[in-house]
Amino acid sequence: MKEKQESAEKGLMEEIEETKKQVAMSPWRQQYHIQPIAGLLNDPNGLAFFGGQYHFFYQWYPFGVTHGSKYWYHICSKDMVHWQERGVALAPDQDFDLQGVYSGSAIEKNGELYLFYSGNKRDYETGERSPSICLAKMSADGVFEKNRTPVIAGPPCGYTSHFRDPKVWQAELGDYWMAVGAQTIAQQGTVLLFKSENLMDWSFEGELETPLADFGYMWECPDYFKLKNLSFLIFSPQGIEATKDGQFQNVYQSGYLKELVETEKPAFSMDAFTELDRGFDFYAPQTFEAPGKRRVLVGWMGLPEISYPTDAYGWAHCLTLPRELTVEQGRLYQRPIQELEMLRMGEYSKKQSIKEQEIYREEEESSQFEIIYRIEHNEAKKLHLKIRANQSSATYLLYEKETRRFTVNRGQAGVPFAEQFGVERSVVLDEALFEVRIFSDESSLEIFLNDGQEVFTLRIFPQGEAKTNEWWTEGGTAQLKIQKWQIKRSEENEL
């Protein structure tokens, strides 16, 4: 079995060798984010800690930047920082998944990693889709074997063929639960629940109860978990209209509901949908429990139905940095995992006064850096930060003290794209801005505000080197404490 898998993967790698040469010419390859060797990456799948290592999978179409018949690509790590490529884990090679091994999740049982995924079967002449929920197992020595038939043959009566993205977990009483993204025949998004005693035989338990009515036409990538005394449902609804106050600006959204944990069967009768990320490029997040009972989230740094400048070089997209989730003040906070500090090189620290009508400027050594700006005192009405700038490109950040509104503008960040969805994103903070933490890679920014209370994720594509950062104020002065590090990729981190 293992020899057969290796032979198939060798043939695939040879087939995409020409595309890899094109990718090597790209000016925007990331240096410390997970990205594809060629082709298109999208949803993170099957995140797990198994056999003493972290195992991540992601959807991968190797032959171009379109959403063709997807594979699951496998990488592993001992620390979620230095990654090793393991290659194709699951390929579209069965009748029930021939048009794609689509998104799913992982759970360990009896020394094996159970991988639940969406099998995509489609008749291209009629357009008819026949989705199913499928199972594969990974042994301790890394061999994958698919179940011969789907574990759920298709959507229950009353739901369309938009039926995908199983998330499986074990409840406190021992039973297993599965949440599946779905669409009703009235074309409304929902989540369906299934229950099992053995991970093989599943019974339909109905729709997950939520307070949301007519909230988009499809709910993708559901993820259910508990933290402290709260339960959370993360999902990605499609078909939500943008609001005048700046919510739901992307083509599709990702966010969560929360509620007090009361019953074994998941249900949500209170609270509103909260966006997880306020940036331009964030979708299909998935979480898992890491050692130490840490809940870690990884998202796709991209969106469907959008062309990106890297498309011309035969590759698209990457994953976000892993983020630890915590519950504070009744809401989810996101912080980059502590292990990322291993990438830091050459700490620089200083205090700096930012005066009105004066620009404070610093040049970075490279495009890969982490900076923490702590605002120790602020009398200014507006704080401005221009980051990753050169003579032709810059990303602009603005904080307005009176309204506590923080805005990111990438209208001049480099090669333009997705401008039909706007070039600004903003959020009103719960409290005054006291910290801005930025991770910069060759073609991305991840901006964490107020110790993880809000996050902006965005791709940028500067033309030429863009390594200048500038601060200035309006209507008063500010005092900053600056800490920064260059980020150096190790030889093991060759993704």
Image: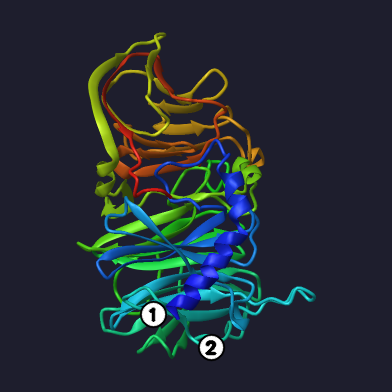
- Compared to 8, does 408 lie above or below? above
Quarter-of-image position of residue 259: bottom left
Residue drawn 53% across the image and 41% down it: 246
In the rendering, which numbered label is found on residue 449?
none
- Compared to 41, does 221 lie above or below? below
- Compared to 183, does 306 lie above or below? above
Amino acid type for the residue under numbered disc 2: Thr
Q: Is residue 261 left or right of residue 190?
A: left
**x and y, in percent, of residue 84 in the image:** 37, 57
Residue extending furthest toward the right: 125
Look at mark 2 in the image and give the residue it sits on.
149
Q: CA distance from mark 1 to mark 2?
A: 20 Å
Q: Is residue 364 left or right of residue 95?
A: left
Label 1 neighbourhood size at 10 Å, few (<14), some (14-19), many (20+)?
A: many
* Secondary structure beneath label 2: loop
- Res 5 seen here: yes
Look at mark 1 in the image and give the residue it sits on.
177
